[in-house]
Image (tube, rainbow, N blue to C red):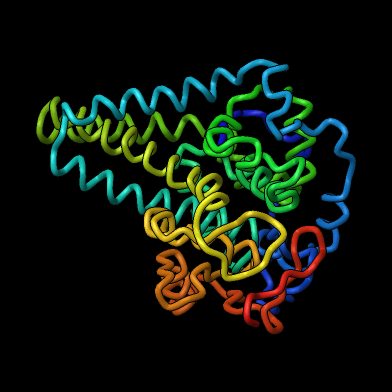
Amino acid sequence: MTPSTLLPAASPAAPTDQSRRSIDLEDETCQFGRAAIHGPDAVESTATEISGDTTTEPRSDGKDAGENGIDWPTLIWIAGMHVAALAAPFYFSWSGLAICLVLCWVTGCLGVTLGYHRLLTHGSFVTSTPVRWFFAFVGGISGEGSAIVWVANHRKHHAFSDQEGDPHSPRDGGLWSHMLWLFPQHSAAEVDAHVKRWAPDLAKDSGAIFFHKTFLLWHFVIGGGLLATGWAIYGPQTGISWLLWGLAVRMVYVFHVTWFVNSATHIWGYRNYETTDDSRNLWWVGLLAFGEGWHNNHHAFQRMAAHGHKWWEFDMTYWVILAMERLGLVWNVVHTPRGAGQTVTSGGGKVAAKGA
């Protein structure tokens, strides 16, 4: 997560038409979600782009995190939201809490979990351009950075999960994997190379580029709107309450439930599948993070839209995807893995299910 405004050098290109043709679950080149952005026809070119030069990519394993200094804009952004959240109890209102809960679901479940993660990163389903851009927008207002940077970081995580090069492995420290990995500074050239390698599809998507450029603007619009509306209707106390609860508290909650997926679910919990990383299923993260806590399931079958594989593994995000599929808003949903408990990993190998 970073509020960086750096853009890839590539010029924007209009997204191609979506195709309703089926996507091969075990096609390794599909796992990075190209089919969800530009349609299955563009998958082959993505595989070529991703395999490009990485000599200028930022190191993200924490071993030399302090050498290039601190990313002060990101640190101030995150710290500022936490400080503002500490003031929220002094301006509590039931209406402010309600706004907080609604926006937690909109930005956390729809934006980060469904949009950034299952659609834009992994291509768990295909949708139209307007719907895709809607998810890119609500993911951005979560405060976790633009889709371009978020997706690039997450794809790299899957490629090197709990190995050298993983941006946020607990093997480099629990607090590092939770949030400290966000703060080392990287040069413009490093970030540009990182994005071009891991998110070349989004780097050419005009909608994703627009929301990348305007990342900070939307937070001022939303924060100012909450403050002005509450103030105009109920007075200054309510206006401040709506601002603090609807922006700061909501953002801090979504921050940490996302970060717990990076940290806690690679430390604690149980495993349904034998994978080559440390991913675990952790029930309380599953509940707090809208189904993202069933992380071992996800690492075993990365493109599956459903992360909960047992009846008790509740996955709110998958329920939303099912509803959208019923309404015709999404299609080519990857409901089940092909084969008896096997999938292609980011490294091209296989993982086997326990008891499969």
Q: Residue at 44% of width from left, 40% of height from top?
A: 255
Q: Name the one closer to the observer, 8 or 118.
A: 118
Question: x, y (%) of residue 269?
Answer: 50, 58
Q: Name the one closer to the observer, 165 or 147.
A: 165
Question: x, y (%) of residue 230?
Answer: 18, 34
Question: x, y (%) of residue 201?
Answer: 73, 51
* Corner quadrant of residue 346: bottom right
| Residue 16 visible in the shown view | no
Question: x, y (%) of residue 46?
Answer: 81, 56
* Corner quadrant of residue 187: top right
Q: Residue at 68% of width from left, 44% of height from top?
A: 152
Q: Name the one closer to the observer, 147 or 169.
A: 169
Residue 56 vs 209, above or below: the answer is above
Lateral position of residue 55 relative to residue 301, left or right: right
* Corner quadrant of residue 21: bottom right
Lateral position of residue 229 relative to residue 329, left or right: left
| Residue 141 visible in the shown view | yes
Residue 44 vs 235, above or below: the answer is below
Lateral position of residue 215 relative to residue 92, left or right: right
